Amino acid sequence: FVALLLLQLWADYIQTFLCCRLPVPRLEDTIRRYLRAQHVLLDDEAYRRTEQFCRSFEHGEGQLLQDELLAYDKENQHTSYPTAFVLDQLLNDRESLLITNVSVDMELTPGSQLVCATNLIVSFGRFHCSLKAGLLTPAESGGLAHRHGAGFVSGTSPKSYLMCMSQLNRLFGTTRIPQESRDELQTILGTRHFVVLHKGYIYICNLLDDSGYILPASTIMANLHHILSDSRPPVQFPVANLTAERRDIWARLRKQLQDQGHGLALSLIESALFCLCLDDQDLKEDGKQLFFGCGGNRWFDKSVQVIVGKDGVTGIQTEHSWCNGMMVMYLINMITKDIQNRPAVTHENSVMYLEPATDVQRLVFDLDSSLQTAVVTARHNFQKMSASASFYCLEFREYGSNFLKGCGVSPDSIVQLALQLAFTRMYGHHAVMVTSCSTGTFLHGRTETFRTATTEALECCTVFCADSPRHGLHRTTLLRKLIEATSQKHKQLILEAATVGNSQCGEKAASRKYCF
């Protein structure tokens, strides 16, 4: 025990030493950036008043707040200063997790639901074992943070930096536990099972044996086949519906479930490595299905839900408080490559692997009338929220990111410019727009936001919308220069928001390997 404790302390020390903390930006820089964003949106008189207020704030209350923030940062050198605030903001949110959970299509080749689900489970098991053994390669920023001083220099790309991977410690065995006022993240280490949801029924299956090795693919496939072959009608009052409720309501209902003897069942769900959702609907035909499901077939509190539609289309949904999109994409890329390179089963040999199910436990929830009513209410609220969301998918085939990069412009800046141009044409004035960027190259980095409504974007939108007599090459040349200027400003804003701070941090961390 002492050896393990010392090893953990050493790992924490190495992690803190090797990964740079996000520096606190200077107050004058914050004021300057704020005024720059406001200048695009305000007339001269309004901007003058805003500028006077900012200068007064900078030399008065702002400096006091800045000193408090610097003191807080100095006292918490084990992490970056925004991390705890971001986590508090997410866990304090009382709305339904339907609004904040992240869903992504895995873009694997569709096929048999059973085969696709088996390969996903085995691949997740491999990822879990690799993570525990420290064998995973840290993700790269992919050019999101070019500036010297952003973090660890990648050995494969000089314009990329290695990301802080500490969020992956919350990937397996984690559930967001509903509490009144503020939820909590619970991570249970050492569990071997995962949860399966099908037609509102909830099953427990083992992924690992007693020694921590992944069970044979044939065993996993047989267990999933047993679940899919269950001919019973869907559950009338699926408990999973309650996880879509607002958090305070779900917290009270969860306490009621525990008081009525369902604490063990809840514990099995919440301690599971992850959740597998086997839908009876096609995911390809209805884009919203991946995000919402049917309510009774999602446990929205789980850190990760692997979703497989009846048509074999697959996706992942993650609860947002423990991770950001960069980690989700890293997970998806690793899982996708693993399945493509070494599938555990194929559609050709899947019949050979079928054997009697050996390890499936179906959880039974005997609900009283008040809980049944709560489930019906939750289902109604879920359906209302789902119906209020519109989902449209446009696949643009004329060109993509590679073409834009070849033109020397940022693909993200072009998308943001297109949104602003559409808004300007529709409403006749510039849009207040915010987009996110990652601070993941810093210790415990999450996300930051920046304003894409810049002077350069405004000028570009104005020229696009103008009924100008200038045509042909002259106008094309002008627009190209404006687009390039907008793209350069966009890149600068990303650097300022995601890689602010001192170059000494990068010099200290450069070329060192980051530990998970």
Image (tube, helix red, strand yellow):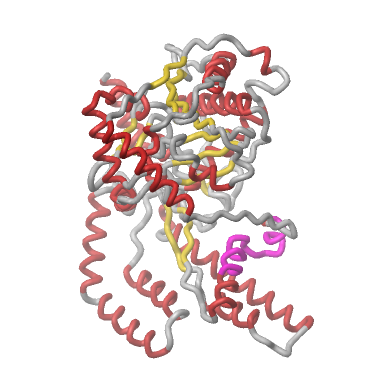
Q: Residue at x 41, y 72 (%)?
A: 33
Which residue occupies 43% across, 35% down? 171
Left or right for 211, reference 108: left
Judge whether residue 405 is colored magenta.
yes
Viewport quadrant of the C terminus: top left
Relative to the observer, which residue lies in front, 153 or 486? 486
Say if residue 487 shows up in the picture. Answer: no
- Toward which corner of the image does residue 283 lie, by quadrant? top right
505 is higher (above) or lower (below) than 205: below
Q: Does the rendering let one see residue 115?
A: yes
- Point out residue 132 in the picture as x, y percentages from the top left corner: 44, 26
Magenta part, dominant SS: helix
Q: Percent from the top left, x then y, of residue 389?
A: 49, 55
Q: Image quadrant for the N terminus?
A: top left
How far from the left and from the top, in percent, is residue 480? 69, 74
Q: Position of residue 228 (x, y in %)?
A: 55, 23
Between 246 and 269, which is closer to the camera in this rendering? Answer: 246
In the displayed structure, would residue 303 be above or below residue 460?
A: above
Furthest toward the right, the residue is: 472
Choose between 147 and 187: the one closer to the eye: 187
In the image shown, does 28 or 104 lie closer to the viewer? Answer: 104
Left or right of residue 484: residue 505: left
Q: Which residues are magenta?
A: 402-419
Say whether residue 182 is magenta. no
Q: How many marks?
A: 0
Q: Is residue 457 left or right of residue 509?
A: right
